[in-house]
Image (spheres, helix red, strand yellow):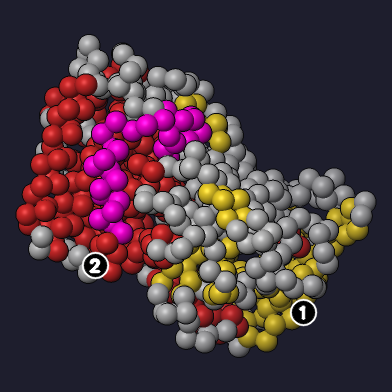
Amino acid sequence: MKMRPPATPLINVDPYFSVWCESDHVHSNTVHWTGKSNSMAIRLFVDGEEFHLLGLNEKDPDTKKRVNTLKLGSMDVDCYSTELTYENERVRVKLKFTSPVMVDDLYYASRPVSYLKASCERLDGSVKSVRLKVVAGEELVLNRAGEGRALSKTADIEGITAISMGRGRQRVLWRSDDDVRIDWGYFYLGVKGEAEVGNTVIYERHFGEMYAVYALCELDDEALILFAYDDIESIQYFGDNLKAYWKKDGKTIEEAIAEAAEDYEAVLSRCDGFSKRLWEDAVAKGGEKYAELLQLATRQVMNAHKLVVDKEGNNLFISKECHSNGCAATVDVTYPSAPMFLIYNTELLKGMLRPVMRYAASEEWIYDFAPHDVGQYPLVNGQVYGVKRNPDKSVEISYETQMPVEECGNMLILFAAICEADNDASFVKPYVETVDAWSKYLIKYGLDPENQLCTDDFAGHLAHNVNLAIKAIMGIEAYSMILERLGDLERAKELDKVAREYAASLEERAKNSDGSLRLAYDKPESFSLKYNSVWDKIWRKGIFTESFYKNEIARYKKEMLPYGVPLDSRRPYTKSDWLIWVASLADSKEDFNFFADSLWAAYNTMRSYAPMTDWYYCDTSHMAGFRNRTVQGGLFIRLMLD
């Protein structure tokens, strides 16, 4: 990878089991996606001399004694693996981290085992002994170091030397929040074959020790290290505590780890094959820089979800709205992330929508439009955005904080997109009554939305939002497509006519002097990214005129800053997902590259070290907010065209 990633993915399984390196070099401390310390260190011993490879903890009092670091020669990142190569005049060492959270395989998308394959080449014939030590700190099993006591014990796993670590007092699924880490369940560190495992103290703190577990093995040729996490129960779903998908047939974590050790080569082959195919597809559609964006996004998108099975046997793929407010199953986070799942696995997208439809059908949801979310991760018990839950169990839902047109449009578009991808409408059939009501809401209120929030809610309320009206129009057309598949041709034709009439009205009413469309009907000469119109391109419906697309692309080129086009004329920040969506409105690959390459440049120069932010300033590339969000699945949308 030619890009310098703003953060390097190492272990990336779900919103809790997440280890990154946020720096220009990998000798700094490792972190959780939230940026909080998640200490892990890897050290090499060459004939007894110690070298640091990864995760040098600056708080470690022995740091001054351990000044030796092995130079990082190269780093490469693809969809599921990160490979680091270190060397000096005596040895060359390769570390390959692989988290096989495969988007096209439900079991591997869920199995919480991540790999490290280490190999050593002796460059000096006098080298007699090479040993590798992996150390994992208590922060992997506590919200913060010192919040509770971490304990460890050796684990009995066939063919594996392993040790586990967990909090002494276990309270499963006891809280929810955004900037919080797991403090229940058990972390496992193992080595395939013979090794030494134990516990240690990384450093002394004013309130105690930093407890850790370690594995030490000979590196005569290569070694396979496994990292795993058994969270016991993963999601609370309307009062029921649900287990992860990988447990649905009764498999234990010990069995999963042993299985993972045996199937490493086969799994790696599948992961590498997927990365290769994606690279080729993305280069053909958008060039090498676009391909690198997708390679970096894949693990991030997957590890912002958790796959579980409900009591009826339905798959639920619960997203966490990372670095926002921690909402779970958020509709306007699912919407931008959908392209990756529409391409590779619609069952995962269906698993995102099932919780929304269950909540929308509940007595608690009193509105005739779609809800925003279904809880705060990992507690999926009902909407929390704009909702007050009282001690007497009564619920107050604020209308002012809802997103009526936004969420109705999102849900209708997503249902239609699933029908198109599957070439089948069976998934939407049980929900037709609710979906029909949402289409009527859009017909009544969508052409000129009142003062309300949209998914870009960080920009505040906005009345007469033109891009939001485009979403409503595409939502109406989406329902027309659904009705056609369900055999109601007459009603489908009626809604198609409404969508086209609304689009013609919008293009006329919102036109600027240069032919581009305004941010809002009442804001002459303003602009905004009309990303919602991309579905018209994908579905080839011709709802909007060719001049609309031509004029929008011309305006975006005019508004381009060094690192992208602003979201609208109010602020110089943008969103990565929407930038690629509007880039996909362009007819030529050259025009697409004009926009996509600016996003690549933003990440390549960004000094706000974090997993791919989707909200940043186009003039400086500084992060405005958000990190590790699943919305980066939206970057795949170019692959849905043509």
Given residues 432 and 177, the one toward you in this image is 432
Residue 488 in view of the camera: yes
Q: Nearer the viewer, residue 603 or 141?
A: 141
Q: How many callouts does the rendering have?
A: 2
Label 1 close to label 2 by CB (< 8 Å): no
Mark 2 Cα-neighbour bin, 10 Å: few <14, some 14–19, many ≥20: few
At 34% from the left edge and 64% from the top edge, which residue is drawn? 350
Asked if residue 159 is positioned above or below residue 82 in the image, the reply reads: below
Asked if the stretch drawn in magenta spans residue 164, the answer is: no
Residue 127: x and y in percent read 68, 63
Kindly identify the residue that appears in the image at 41 percent across and 72 percent down.
315
Q: CA distance from mark 1 to mark 2?
A: 51 Å
Quadrant position of residue 150: bottom right
The quadrant of the picture occupied by the N terminus is: top left
- Residue 451 is covered by the magenta coloring: yes
* First reached walking from the N terminus: tag 1 or tag 2: 1
**Residue 469: which quarter of the image?**
top left
Provide residue 519's location: percent of width, then percent of height. Answer: 34, 23
Q: Which residues are magenta?
A: 434-462
397 to the left or right of 23: left
Q: Which residue is mark 1?
A: 153
The residue carrying pointer 1 sits among few (fewer than 14), some (14 to 19) or many (20 or more) residues within 10 Å by Cα, namely some
Q: Amino acid at mark 2?
A: Lys
Circle 2: element type: helix
- Looking at the image, which residue is at 62% across and 41% down? 23
Give the residue pinned by disc 2: 429
Residue 97 shows in the view: no
**Spot occupied by residue 458 in the image (x, y as percentages of width and height):** 51, 33
The amino acid marked with disc number 1 is Lys
265 w.r.t. 431: above or below: below
